[in-house]
Every structure is written in C-alpha cells, then in structure tokens.
Amino acid sequence: MSAVITVKSLAKAYRYAKRRGGFFEAFSPEHVTVEAVAGVDFEIGKGERVAIIGPNGAGKSTTLKMLSGILEPSSGEASVLGLTPWKQRKALAYRIGVVFGQRSQLWGELPARESFALLRHIYDQEAAPFAKRLGELTERFALTDLLDQPVHRMSLGQRMRCEITASLLHGPNLLFLDEPTIGLDVTAKAAIRDFIREHARDHGQTVLLTSHDTRDIELVCDRVIVVNQGRIVVDQPTDQLRRRFLGRKIITFQSAGQGVSLDLPGVTRRASEAHATILEVDTRLTRVERVIAAAMADGGIEDVTIEDPPMEEVIAEIYASTHAA
Amino acid sequence: MRRDLIAACVALRIGAGQAMAGWTVLAGRCLFYVLIMTVLSALWDKVAAEPVAGAIALPAGGLVLYVLATEWITLALPSVHLRFEDDIRSGGLEPHLLRPKFYLLQSLAQSLGGTLVRLAALGVTAVVWLAATGRQGPPAATYPYLFVLGVLAVSVGMLLYAVAGLCAFWTRRILPVMLVIQKLMFLLGGLFAPITLYPDWLRKLAEATPFAAHLYWAGVQALAPSGPMFLKAAAWQVLWIVLLSLLCVVLWRAGLAKVLREGGV
C-alpha cells in the first residue's frame, strides 16, 4: 500500500508570554514553551481510515493542522500526497478536504447553494463534473430542501452535512476530519458516520479523523493512533483496540425507589447517586439489552441513559495498559 | 491569475446579491441618509444665511452638496475591518487558509460587491432627496463622473478599513486603530467641510492623504464639477488604492506568517 501520509519526528512547541502580577513585570514577561506534539512518526496508506484519538491537549488537532498545511512544525518532516504541507499549502488545498466540527467553512449568511457555487470557482472546478458531484452528494445527504437556506439558519446536523459536502465537492484524495460529529444528536451522528465510511470506501479515499467519540472511531476507522501529551501511545487496528478497550457501556437507570441491583457477568456498579444507578457493562460478556431487560424486570425504572465511557477514561486505561506491558 | 480573478468576480457578485437580499437593512441605511441630510442641510443653510463676521465665505449654495457626497460614500462603506478582526481573533481564518484562493482578495471582492449596491441605492436616494427638497443638484451630465469617483472613494475607504482589520494579527482588538482612522477621516478627509477651508499648508497636507482620497475629492466634485478636477481626483484615488493594496498585502503576509508559526494570534 503506497503511503499517502508520511510523518517523521514531527514536533510542535508553542511559546507564549506568561503574565505576571505587577506593573514593571508587564514589561519583562516570562516566556513558557509548551510541547504540543513531541516528535511523532507514522505512515498512512492509500484508502486507510485512521483515527487519531486522545484527551484534550494531546496534540490531535495540532497534528492535523500541520498535516493540512496551516501550521508550521518546530521540527520534523511530513509528506502528504507527495507534498510538504506547510510549504505547498496551495497545491495541497486542491487535493485535500477538511472539516472542522467546531468551525464552519461555509459562509453563514449565504444559502448553501451559493457557498457551493463559490467553492466551485475557488477550487477551479469545471461546471459539468462539479454539478454531477454536487447532485450525488445532495441526494446522498438529502440536502435538496436545504440548498436555498442560509447556513446560519440550519441546525447543527444540517450544517455538518453541508460542511462535509463542501469538503468533498472538489473530489479530494484525502479527507481530514476534526471532531466531525461533535454536538450532534445520535441520528445525525449515525448518518455522518455511515456517509464518511461508505464514501471513503467507494472512492478509495484516505481519511484521517480526530474525535472524542469512541463510536466515530469504531464505526468509521480501521486503524487507531492514540496520542497523549504529544506522543503516540498506541497505533493498532481498530478491531484490536475494540476487543481490549472499546467494549464497554455506561448505563444509568433513574428510579423512584431504591436503586437497581443486578448480578450479571461483566456488569459492575459505579459510584451512584440517590435514585440513579450507574452500571458499567462489558458488552463482550453481557449485551446491553439483557442488562436493560433485567433492570426493567426488577421494576421501578423511570428513565435509562446509555453512554460510551468518556474518552479520557478510555485513554487512561490504554495508557495504563501499555505502560504496565 | 485569470482563475483568481474569476473567483474574485464570483465573490463580488455574491456580495452584491447579499446586499440586495438584505434589502430591509439597505432601506434602513437610505432612510438614515435622508435623516442625516435633513439635519445637516438645515445646519449649513443657517450658517450660509447668517455668516459669522470675519469667517471664510462659503461656496455658493452652501455645503449641502458636499456633505451629500461625503455621506453617500461614508454610508456605503462595508464593515470589512470587523470581518477581518473576527476571522483573525476567532481562528475563523483556518478554513480560508485551507483553500487555494487568496483570502484577502476574495473577502475584499465580496465586500466591494455589497458596497457597490449600497452606493447605487444611496445615490438614487440622494437624487430623490434633492428633488424632494427642491435643491439644485449637480448637472445630470456629471453623475457618471461622480459615480466613478464614488466607486474609487469607497475602494480607498474599504482598504483603509482593511488595514485596520489586518492589525488584529498584532493587536487582537482593532477599536483603537479604527478610532484613529475615523478621526483622521473626519479631520483630513473633510467629512463635514471641504479642506479648502483649512489654512493653505494644512490643505496641501490633507489633500495628499488617503483620507482626502476617500472623502474630499468626490465631495468637491459634487460641489463644483470640472474636468481637470475630476482627473486630479481620480489620479489621487488610484494612487492611494495601489498604495493601500500593497500595504494590505504586506500586512497580510506578515500576519499569515505569524499565524502559521504560532497557530493563532
């Protein structure tokens, strides 16, 4: 498999002035250096779908910014589609698509149709292939009714569908996705994950994704790079990671009376509150529906919430496990 | 280069479309223009009718036409400085940097599109206001020349605002810069009174500034239209458009280098 991304000893340190109290100290600020990415190495092959995960401040977004060319590294090398991103940003821009979940690339006050029309000219696309691609994406993402709506009036889920469409209109070989499902409801997340996976598979597109949501990783990516404090902790196929770390769910039962008490394999009770029982379920040993059925049979359940364990917890577990090894 | 210009033209068209789509805001500006002119014309009529002893004689017809032109330009200006400040401070620049086209050119083209629509709408308002108040306007044959100077004038103003906006790369907040620019527009641009009323040395100094290119030259053409004055005005305006464009490019490149190095401002 030919490498689409090659990264060698890539590092980024930020230097900022630390404010100190006092009038005269303001003229001689103390400078602090923070190592955001501390020399990472990896390769990503054509058609691979790779997730970079890690807690806040781990260096995920910094890595993505360096690879997309909008941030210069402090040291190290990177090649993306044969180009050095921060030196050939414009040439690279024609060949990559980027989605920042927390930042819109569309013009908020414009209808999506006009944003897309402007993007055609920004990416120097011929009218016919562009129209064909837009037609396909519009149909796949059910955007027909949204095209004439200003982007700022759309819901987050609708906007994200338009964002992803916008990032694909020029037919990029490589897609960078930074938290693409952040803030979306369950249905919108599922639609976006399905789309990214299927589109990348059908078009042989390489995907590099960062996320806080373990489901994004499980359902979209076939390889996971775990970073912590700017370093790669784990780099392995998603299947392996899933077997070891991603098979857990947190189920919270709200009840009017006393808490839920279950004796099932792989089910442990977490610190709970009055009228709320929090269970951690190892889904490899007991399925979620079985836990819920057992709790319902117990009676008195008013509400149920099912969540993935927080990313920080998963990372801590991976980190502890790799260091113990 | 050709493709860059095509993309800029599309951005200009979209900017114009946006201004027309927000017609209620545009109508509000026109009404505000009428309100301002009603107040200022009353003021200048009174000044012309009761000259202060020893004061400089004002041009015939008062300064209403002059103020009509300077307010026409001022009210058509886009808030491009706020857009730049917001994009630079919030990190909203990042998606634009991931595109193969020049952000500065695209943004200015889009702003200019909206400005041209406002300039046309306010121009029509000015003509209607003159007719409604029974005032003598400049000869109709001079309107095309006035429009050319108006377009050049708003371009100078937009570039001055762009310079202020790009300062956000270093200052983060541009309010202090904007206050200085707006005061200089007022003083050296001759917002309410032509700089011909200034002492000779100050007049010569003011005429050579971008602030006069932004306001004074179009205003004086409305007051006393003449061919040589039109050419002189256009020459000053084009000169400042070139110089301010170069300054914007220099600031942009320096600011971009900072963002690429530091990841933000």
Image (cartoon, rainbow, N blue to C red):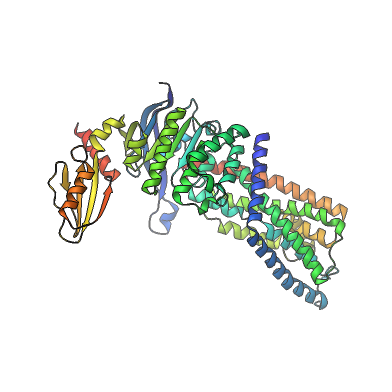
Q: Is residue A277 visible?
A: yes
Is residue B133 depicted above or below B113 in this figure? below
Q: How many marks?
A: 0
Q: Quadrant of residue B203?
A: bottom right
Q: What residue sits 41% from the left and 55% below the top?
A: A25
Q: Is residue B159 visible?
A: no
Q: Give the left or right position of residue A231, taking residue B147 as reference.
A: left
> Where in the figure is residue B229, as x and y percent of width and height?
84, 54
Which one is in front, A265 or A227?
A265
Most extreme residue toward the left is A263
Q: Give the left or right position of residue A65, taking residue B231 as reference.
A: left
Q: Quadrant of residue A49?
A: top left
> Where in the figure is residue B175, as x and y percent of width and height?
56, 59
Q: What residue sits 65% from the left and 42% below the top?
A: B8
Which one is in front, A79 or B175?
A79
Most extreme residue toward the front is A297
Is residue A6 depicted above or below A257 in this figure? above
Q: What residue sits 64% from the left and 47% below the top?
A: B14
> Where in the figure is residue B49, as x and y percent of width and height?
82, 77
Q: Quadrant of the N terminus of chain B?
A: top right
> Where in the figure is residue B139, as x and y percent of width and height?
87, 60
Q: Give the left or right position of residue A71, taking residue A119 as reference.
A: left
